[in-house]
Image (cartoon, rainbow, N blue to C red):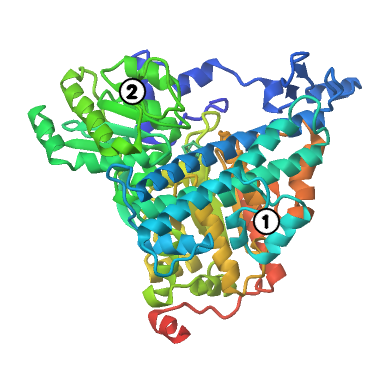
Amino acid sequence: MADGKEKSIDKATLELIEKAEREGISTVFSRADDMKPCPIGVEESCCKVCSMGPCRMPRSKKGEGARRVGVCGATVDTVVARNFARKVAAGSASHSDHAREVVLTFLKTARGESQDFSIKDEIKLLEVALDFGINIEKRDTKDIAIELGEKALYEFGKQSGELVYTKKAPLRRQEIWRKFGVLPRGIDREIVEVMHRTHMGVDQDYRHILQQAARAALADGWGGSMISTELQDIMFGTPVPVLGSINLGVLKEDHVNVVVHGHEPLLPEMLVAASRDSGIRELTDRAGAKGVNLAGMCCSANEILMRHGIPCAGNFLQQELALVTGAVELMTVDVQCQMQGLASVAECFHTKLITTSDRAMIEGAEHIEFHPEQGLDIAKRILTMAIENYPNRRHSVYIPAQSQDMVAGFSHETITYLLGGLFRASYRPLNENIANGRIRGVAGVVGCNNVRTQHDAAHLAMIKELIRNDVLVLTTGCSAMACGKAGLLTPEAAHFHAGGGLTEVCEAIGIPPVLHLGSCVDNSRILIAATAMVKEGGLGDDLSDLPAAGAAPEWMSEKAIAIGQYFVTSGIFTVFGTTWPTTGSENVTEHLFHEYEDMYKGMWAFEQDPIQAAGLMIAHIDKKRKALGIDKGRERVLFDMAMRRAME
Ligand code: NFS
């Protein structure tokens, strides 16, 4: 680390970085030491969209009096806005192509063409069908599901009109989107339009380019990501609180260890089913292992943790380290956040690296393509390979001791149930506790790890500061896993880390002060929860009125930028850490950080220090409390069961 800090605050991670160094194995941590970031790229003032360049227009040129334009005359504002918009497009495309795969599998399942998939949550099927305007009366589940699958698929290619889920947003929010021309039409159309507008010589007004970046991001948050979450819940079950464990210590020396890495929960669901198969158990016995130990990595981990309590091996920066243990027989990867470095780490051990998506191959990995038509068979084939590889384990096995219990599975449905009880499921107790000041506000802290900052440190510093100040934290993705490792996802964490008001509420309901809502596509659950808070009443009539804020203190991926952009344009103040990809243009930064507040009532901010960033979020929350007239704090009333009953 540039500032002399250790590379991670997690002991298991540090131990395995050391093992990798000792054994001469290259990992993201050693490569980051060898590769300094490009100073022009980091401020995004470099244009590569045609072959007359690349044109470099760093801020340092300003002092020399040079006009910062490329050879075609494109200003640095245009160039920085283009680069930003393309990140949004790539991020939105990733979530939405994941969503497309889920919809296609859903349709095959509805038509009876997939193997071992089913509709697990019929109530949610009916609710989502109603959202899509489908008649559910006197029709069987199969018919409804087929129509829902077809309608959901249509959302991707829609050429005009508005996406179905944008109509779930508060009316005031929809008006704002309409006013600024950012209501998304089809998901694919908005992403294609970003790519067209940012081609050489097309859209050359930075504000106008960023308008399309808003529309593409909203197509992700209120389109692709939301469709993924909802259809996954229908097929695999809506998460309910579940006990799990996390960190590299979940790997077991006497078991066949299979790590499931990536994002789409389709193969992971089948691997869970296959691992419980009697034939697989027999094979494991014969290989002399005590069982198959399935463990997740990155967002695939969150998906199978939320629904099955399968342990998580770790988050983004721990992926290669899982293999460095020497105890992993096989790792599957599908799409997104899978480092190519995995292939060379796997080569140092007996580990088989298996790519499974038709969209992603890695040189040196074996490819076994997943198709839902043979879902369970393919999963069994993969587990069989892992079991057969168990006797090939070599000498240098080291599994760190760290493994931490945690509670995950806080879907929007679960939160309403926990707050209000089965028959009075409602956000009212939450809104009341915000209004009376016991809970100061709500923060969504999400996103990645980034090797340019100390692993997990910023997530934990920020989140501890927020809960200490009575801010309830909702978390997803790699941030949620950082919290899990640090013990923040247990109900007892309130007692040790949260402020008095938040602790009282958490203890009354029996929830942790930090709620794990799932993977990154599940950030849509945060949008739904925030919308439910607005609709419950008492906290304004738009998402921007809520005492709420968002953050990604260790972001690195384009998906994080897409998520931030849809949070901001949905009215949520959002702070990012590590680096900020528009520093090359003061005008673009001013537009996103300040002009957006006038337009969308939500804006971006950049702050590397996580405590300072939490301070910005708390100041914003207090500003919103003041605007709502709840800053004085009413008499503090805690909802007990008797009061919940009386609410009726
Ligand atoms: Ni999100 Fe999941 Fe993690 Fe970042 Fe990558 S795994 S989708 S992008 S790194 S949080």
Locate residue 78, reporting x and y percent.
Answer: 80, 31
Locate residue 310, reporting x and y percent.
Answer: 29, 45
Q: Amino acid at mark 1?
A: Gly
The answer to whether the residue bearing label 1 lies less than 8 angstroms from the nearest atom of ligand 1 is no
Q: Quadrant of residue 52?
A: top right
**540 over 564 or under it: above or below:** below
Left/right placement of residue 467 relative to residue 347 reads: right
Locate residue 245, reporting x and y percent.
Answer: 30, 46
Report the residue that reaches farthest toward the right: 65
Locate residue 284, reporting x and y percent.
Answer: 13, 32
Residue at the image point whose x is 77% and y is 17% from the top: 55
The mark found on residue 571 in the picture is: 1
- Secondary structure type for disc 1: loop
**58 over 378 or under it: above or below:** above
- Secondary structure type for disc 2: strand
**420 over 548 or under it: above or below:** below
Mark 1 and mark 2 residues within 8 Å of each other at the beta carbon: no
Q: Quadrant of residue 53?
A: top right
Residue at the image point whose x is 64% and y is 34% from the top: 87
The mark found on residue 211 in the picture is: none
Closer to us: 105 or 172: 105
The mark found on residue 353 in the picture is: 2
Report, in whole angstroms, how far the alpha carbon at label 1 lies from the one at label 2.
42 Å
Q: Amino acid at mark 2?
A: Leu
Left/right placement of residue 116 relative to residue 81 reads: left
The local crowd at label 2, few if under 14, some if 14 to 19, many if 20 or more residues have their Cα within 10 Å, is many
Which of the two labelled residues, at mark 1 and mark 2, occupies the earlier sequence position? 2
The local crowd at label 1, few if under 14, some if 14 to 19, many if 20 or more residues have their Cα within 10 Å, is many
Residue at the image point whose x is 39% and y is 74% from the top: 421
Residue at the image point whose x is 74% and y is 56% from the top: 178
**622 over 59 or under it: above or below:** below
